[in-house]
Amino acid sequence: MADESKEPRTRRRMKIGRIRIGLNVIVQIALILFLAAMVNSLAFKHYKRWDFSRDQKYALSDKTKRFLDTLKGKMRITVFFSPSTPITADVQNLLTEYQYAGKGRIDVEQIDPERNLSRAKELFEKYKVVTDESLLVLDYDRRNRSVKASEMADVDQSGMAVGEGPRVAAFKGEQAITSAMIDLVEGKKKTLGYVTGHKEPALSAPTSPITLLKTFIENENIKFQELNLLDQPAIPTDMNAVMIIGPQYDFSDREMKVLRDFWDKQGRILVLIDPAANTPRLRAFLDELGIKVNDDRLMVFVRTGIQELALTRDVQAHFLGDSPITKRLADVRAIFVGGTASLTLDPNRGRAASIRLEPLIQAEKSYFAESDYNSDNQAKLQADAQKAGDVSLIIAASAEKGGSADARVQVNSSRLVVVSNATFVQDSAIMQDEAALNFVSGAVNWLLSREQMIGIAPKIPKPLTFSLDPEALRRLRWILLVLMPLIPAAIGTVVWWQRRV
C-alpha cells in the first residue's frame, strides 16, 4: 500500500518538474530573442564605419561632417543620373556617406530619367530643370540648387578616338555638393574684397595665375569683389574681409588710412607679402601690430653629391597646430616656392595693443635667413648658414584684437593673417602641393568667423605606382620564372611519391 501511494506522488512531482523546465526554457528563449532584438536595434541605430581604401575616395572631410552637424532642418537630394554616366556609382556611394554623416537630416531619392519618365518630368517642372545633363538637386527650406555631373568630375575623353570609354581623371563630388549645401543654408554669400591697384595678380583675367584659388574660395559660398582703395573713402560695410596678394607697389597714405580704419572697426585682413617688393608703408602697418617682415630670404643648402652642395630658395615648412587656422594641418609639410622672408613676432608690442599673436607656419630646421640674399658668394653663404645654427623661422602668423582666448566664446574682433610669401597660392604651385588651398581656406574661414568650415581641400585620386630598381626586377624575374612554377611541381612530386608507395 505504501508503494502504491508513493507512485502517484512521484509522477505528480515529475509532471510539475517538466512544466517548470518547459517554462524555464521558454523564458530563456524569450530573453535571448529580446536581447538579440535589442542588440540588433542598437547596432542598426548606432554603428561606426571605416574606410580602409588607399585613397579614401568617398571618405568625407572633417569640414563636411562639421557642416552637416550644423543642419537644423531636412535636406532633400534628388539624383537625376543616367546609368551610362561615368560617375553614377561614385555619386551614389558618396551620397550614402552624406546620409550616414547627416544622422537622419538628409533624404536621397534616386531617379533614372530614362526609365521613370513621369516622376522625372514632375520634378523637372518643380525645380525648373532645363538641361539634359545628369545632375542632382538639393532642396532645403524651400530653396533649391542643382549640381551638374560636369561640376563633380574631370573626365578624360582622350581615349574615345581609339575606342576606349571616358575615364574619370578626378572626382570632385564632395567639393561640389558641400559647396551647394553651404550656399543653400547660408543664403547670402560672404564678400571678400580683393585689393587691386598695386600690380597684384589679376583676379578675373583669362591668364590669371590664381584661377584655382579663386574657384576654390568661391566654391565655399564666398564672393570675390575687386577693391581699389584709392576709389573708396572707406571699405564698404557689406565687405566681410579683405585680401591683399603680393602688391608690387606700396600703398599711399590715404590707402593706409582706409586700411587702418577698417582694422580699428573689427576688420578682417589677409596679407601675402612679396619679399622682393618695396612696400614700406604696408610693412610699417604690420610692424605696428607686432609682426615684422624682415629684409632677408630663407635658404638651405642641399647635398646633391658626395661633396656637392646646391642652394635652394624654395622653403619646405610645416604648419603649427596651436591656431584654429592650422589645427587640422598640424605637422603637415608644404613647399613655398619663390622668395620667402622670415617674420619676427613682438609679443610685447602686441600685448600693449591688446593683440594676440600666433605663429602659423615654421620653416624646417635646416633653413637659415640670409640678409645678403643677392650675393653669389657660395663660401660666404655657407658660412652664414653655419653661423645661423638651429633657429626657428616663422613665415606666417595671425593677429587678433578684441576677441576671446577661448575658442568656444564668439566675440567680435579684428583679425589679420600674414604670410611672407605671395607665390605659393599661384596655380603652378598649387598643382604641385595642395596644402596652399588647405591653409588659405582655413585662413579665410577664420577671418570670416566660420571656424566650423575650416577643413581640407578636396582629394585628387592618384594612381598606385611601384618603382623597382634593377636588383628588385631581377629578384621578381626569378620568383615568376623559377620559384612559382617550382611550388606546384614540388606538390605534385610529393603526391605522386605517396601514391607510388
Image (spheres, rainbow, N blue to C red):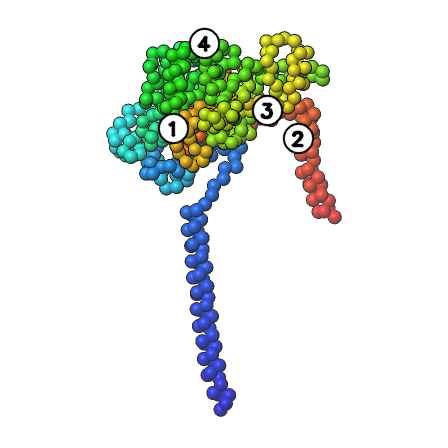
Q: How far apart in space, not on screen, are marks 4 and 2 (Cα)?
A: 65 Å
Q: Residue furthest bottom?
A: 1
Q: In terms of sequence position, does the residue under pointer 3 or pointer 4 come before the other?
A: 4
Foreground label between 3 and 2: 3
Q: Name the residue under label 4.
A: 249
Query: Above or below — where is 284 with respect to 171?
Result: above
Q: In this view, does 455 lie to the left or right of 372?
A: left
Q: How far apart in space, not on screen, are marks 3 and 2 (Cα)?
A: 51 Å
Query: Above or below — where is 328 with respect to 21?
Result: above
Q: How far apart in space, not on screen, are marks 3 and 4 (Cα)?
A: 30 Å
The tag on residue 179 is 1
Q: How crowded is mark 4: few (under 14 residues within 10 Å), some or many (20 or more)?
A: some
Q: Which of 219/238 is in front? A: 238
Q: Is residue 273 left or right of residue 300?
A: left
Residue occupying image coordinates x 51% and y 29%: 329
Whole-percent x, y for residue 138 in the image: 33, 32
Q: Mark 3 points at which residue?
A: 392
Q: Name the residue under label 2.
A: 480
